[in-house]
Structure formats: structure tokens, C-alpha cells
Amino acid sequence: MMYLRKILVTTDLSEHSLAAMEYAASFGLLYSSTLYLLHVIDARVAQRHTEEEARRALDEFIVKHVSPDVPLTPVIRQGHPSFEIRKFAEQEGVDLIVIATHGRTGLRHMVMGSVAERTVRHSNVPVLSVKPRPLRENLLLKEDVEKELHLR
């Protein structure tokens, strides 16, 4: 049997990252896990955001979106997000990383890349990638495309 003693959930402080928090909190309760909520200050914008500002924003995010019943340890790191996520997970002996995707596709995905994708691809720790509900509910189906293109 597998035990999830330590779970790392990531956040970029967006509404999308709440999907990851839901899953991590559920697993955390099920396994009585230690939960870490990690926010990485992206190195490309670090000059504009101080660690103190990031700490305040993370605290506000927790108060606004996370139930007080969910025990978690907030963590701030600075650097390249996917690298810092993997580094923290390995240093802390995390058993599972939970990360939300933003659902970017096409050119935006190619230009901006995907922190979730790089984390999944390069992590030695298992990663659960979660698609937020609005993105899951708005997926295009083959039938939708055929209908829009008048193929049937």
C-alpha cells in the first residue's frame, strides 16, 4: 500500500490553481498528510515582486480560498517555477506533487510553455496534473467541431 505522507500543491495564486488545492486537500485528509502550498516567484518577474509581497499575496490567497480545516504549510521560493517545484519536492521528500494546468494550447502554449508539463516530464516524484473544472467542462468534442464546420 502506498502512503502519501507529504503532498506538495503548487499555486500561481490564480483561480485555476484551486483545482489542485481541492485534490491535495482531499488526499491530505484521506492520508493524514503534511500539505505544502508552494508559490514560486518567477525569476523573470522577480525584480517586480518581492518575497514579502509574495508572502502577503499567498496569505491572502489562503484566507480567501482555503478552508481553515485544511492544515498546510505555505512556502515561497524564487526561481524558475518547474525547477523550484521539483527541487523543493526532492529536498522535502514529498510523495506527490499536485499541480493545476491552465489549459493553454497552440501558440500561447508554445511561447509561454507549461510549468505543469515541464514538472510532469522532469520530476522524479509522482505528479498529479489537474485540469480546472471550467476547462474540463468546455472541452471541444469531435461532434462539436463537425457541427460547427457543417460536416454532418
Image: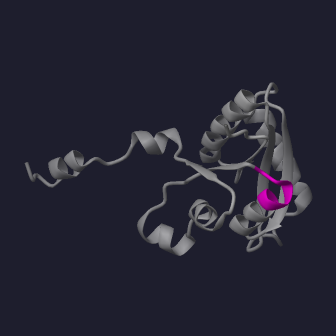
User: Is residue 77 found left or right of 7 in the rendered image?
Assistant: right
In this picture, is 90 found above or below 11?
Answer: below
Front residue of 12/94: it is 94
Q: Position of residue 57 (x, y in %)?
A: 81, 48
Considering every residue shown, the one lying at the far front of the view is: 1
Start-end of magenta stretch: 88-94
Q: Position of residue 53 (x, y in %)?
A: 87, 56
Q: Is residue 49 magenta?
A: no
Q: Main secondary structure of the magenta part?
A: helix
> Residue at left 68%, top 39%?
24
> Residue at left 64%, top 46%?
17
Quadrant including the N terminus? top right
User: Is residue 145 found left or right of 119 in the rendered image?
Assistant: left
Front residue of 27/66: it is 27
Considering every residue shown, the one lying at the far right of the view is: 52
Front residue of 147/7: it is 7
The image's colour scheme reads one colour
Residue 41 falls in which quadrant of the image? bottom right
Considering every residue shown, the one lying at the far top of the view is: 69
User: Is residue 112 found left or right of 69 in the rendered image?
Assistant: left
In this picture, is 74 found above or below 124?
Answer: above
> Residue at left 52%, top 46%?
131
Residue 2 falls in which quadrant of the image? top right
Q: Position of residue 49 (x, y in %)?
A: 83, 64
Q: How many marks?
A: 0
Q: Position of residue 132 (x, y in %)?
A: 53, 43
